[in-house]
Amino acid sequence: MKNYNNFYNSSDSNREQEREQGKVQPFKSEVEKRDTLVGFLNEDIGTGDITSDILIPEETISKGTIVCKNGGRSIIVSGLSEAKIIFDICGCEATLLVDDGAKIAKGIDVLIVEGSSRSILKGERTALNLLMRMSGISTRTNQFIEKLGELSKTVRISSTRKTDPGLRYFDKRAVVIGGGISHRVRLDQLILIKDNHIAIVGSVKKAIEKARSVYGNKRKIECEVIDFNGIVEAIESGADIVMLDNFKPEEVKESLDRIRKLGLRNKIIIEISGGINLDNIYDYAIAKPDVISIGSLTHSVQSIDFSLEIPG
């Protein structure tokens, strides 16, 4: 199977060697990631938890358990390592009972946290929010992959940049944990020529040739197209990846059949995007594109319900 994550990243990226297949690494270090989580905590805590500080003596120690409350479907948990770091920042000791990526069900305990009662409560909401969101993303990603069946061995499910500001790393990491791939994390990793670029520059050919004249082979070039003529123009102009945007399933199949007959299929990675959901993804996948990118994985998240329970 092609290593699409490395393919989507620039060949001269300073972090290229840090990226294994499925790895998302926009942070320069774990310290930078930790600092981001500190910022999330500060956003929630402000100058202090005035309720807990009034009601709970400073020396009080507690032990709590995070439990899955969602029912009715299998859940792919993710965000546990982030929750552990958050509680660690608060001065508590957290122990994971399952690993990120585990398939769980309602009633399963996933983490135990011990320490100052005040500190546990300071970290509670931030830890749960990330855990709930990331698990929702991982679970939805896995649902798409399961819909593909055997086709998932060759057709990859990818995220997009349709993430909430500040959460891109965590959203994309959740997609990877669910079995998908990241695509580009930032604008500097891949030249992706979209409809507005083409409208301004004048044509697919002009846009690709201009990009290649500046970057040569130092950046991969992907081009979004809206019809079969655009596919051929993009391939013949030297694109590395062609994105078929808002094609119907039958249009994808017809287009891929035609470029195979032209002997062009092996020269290009084909990505499809736009209007893809759980009901129609198999219809797209049977045409055997390389990648299916789905914005709803991260822009329409259905969080998984977890709660922190501290016995009285």
Image (spheres, rainbow, N blue to C red):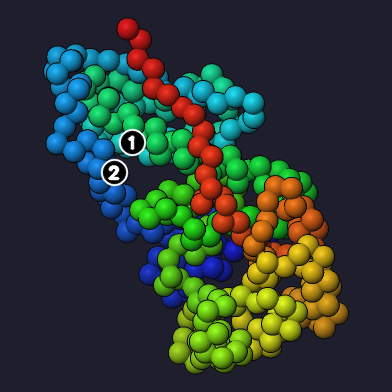
Residue for badge 2: 40
Residue 126: mark: 1
Query: Which element is circle 2 on?
Result: helix
Residue at x 29%, y 43% (from the top left corner):
40
Disc 2 residue type (three-letter): Phe
Q: Residue 116 location in percent, x, y?
A: 21, 20
Label 1 or label 2, whichever comes before in sequence order: 2
Disc 1 residue type (three-letter): Thr
Above or below: residue 226 compared with residue 80: below
Q: Residue 134 location in percent, x, y?
A: 47, 41
Above or below: residue 264 compared with residue 45: below
Above or below: residue 263 compared with residue 167: below
Packing grade of label 1 (10 A; few <14, some 14-19, many >=20) is many
Q: Residue 131 location in percent, x, y?
A: 43, 36
Task: Give the quarter of the figure containing the N terminus.
Answer: bottom right
Q: Mark 1 near mark 2, Cβ–Cβ under 8 Å?
A: yes
Q: Residue 165 location in percent, x, y?
A: 38, 55
